[in-house]
Image (cartoon, rainbow, N blue to C red):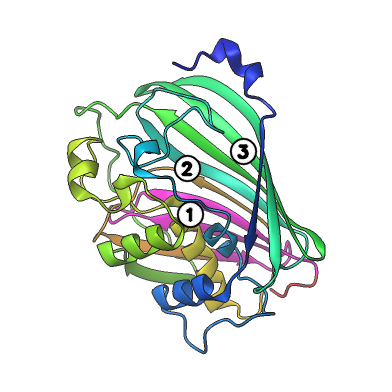
Amino acid sequence: MFDIKHVNQWLGKRERRDDWLAPAPAAALASLLGRAGPPPEPGEALPPLWHWLYFNRLSPPEALGADGHPRRGGFLPPVELPRRMWAGGRVEWLQPLRLGERASRDSRIAAIQDKSGRSGPLLFLTLRHEISGENGLALVEEQDLVYCRPPAADQAAAPPAPIPATPWRRALRADDVLLFGYSALTLNTHRIHYNRDYATGSEGYPGLVVHGPLLATLLLELCGRSAPGFRPGGFRFRSLRPLFENTEIALGGLPDPADRMVALWAWNAAGLPAMEARLQWAPDGGA
């Protein structure tokens, strides 16, 4: 079992992955998200957050845990708390990554912190990634992972709330086809996103769970639909509660042209925020 006292053994641990930014995964994601127009081609800039399609690896079956993730204790510490979730993150774009080029991702464990929440002990782990293309460093990202126990069955649910009005709006349902497709494209083997029996029986969710990265991507897709041609400079997001398959999801954006910023939210069917985010436009990125 991972002991927080041994944190210094893991802090700063590094990993490097190289990849070819092949056009085919980007074309498949464009189709999955319902993007109009021709598929992306070599030389085009990779849309924001689509780097999550790359630098992923499949593990052989014997190297997977019961949850479908690679067994803990390789690059990530062997935390025994059963649930692992992507709690949020921050991305800064320095220059575009382009389809068809070779790229590398240098990763390190930047922080480990134990806390306590309503469901018991929590462990937060921050990964820092630096992704470089053929022209040098292109983006810097920090990912916040949280390990925890399932909440108690009798934990009170938050009361419903009205969804605020925002000028940028979109409503959708994330069905199992979308969740399976995104899992396949990102090589995400976590069973909560595609195995309903595991999600409900082993982890206590009411259904398949919408990926946090997928939800963040959908928020930036909302920006692209509402302000075509924009280019992001920085993005930060925080997951507040899970969303589930076949339930109404509302996306909203509130632009602030003076600060070249957009406040973004995703709400569940009860009007409760599931994700909040802030997007900063690049200085020459439109608004």
Rendering coords of residue 280 (x, y %)? 69, 60
Q: Residue 213 has which mark?
A: 1
Residue drawn 73% across the image and 68% down it: 96
Badge 3 marks a residue whose secondary structure is strand
Q: Quadrant of the N terminus?
A: top left
Residue 86, which numbered label? 2
Q: Amino acid at mark 3?
A: Leu
Instruction: Determine whether label 1 and label 2 are within 8 Å by CB.
Output: yes
Secondary structure type for disc 2:
strand
Tell me the residue that label 3 is attached to: 127
Of the image marks 2 and 3, the number of the one nearer the N terminus = 2
Quadrant that contains the C terminus: bottom right
Q: Quadrant of residue 179?
A: bottom left
The answer to whether residue 101 shows anywhere in this view is yes
Going from N to C along the chain, the mark reached first, 1 or 3, is 3
**Relative to 103, is 126 on the left or the right?**
left
Q: Residue at x 45, y 74 (%)?
A: 28
Q: Is residue 260 above or below residue 65?
A: below
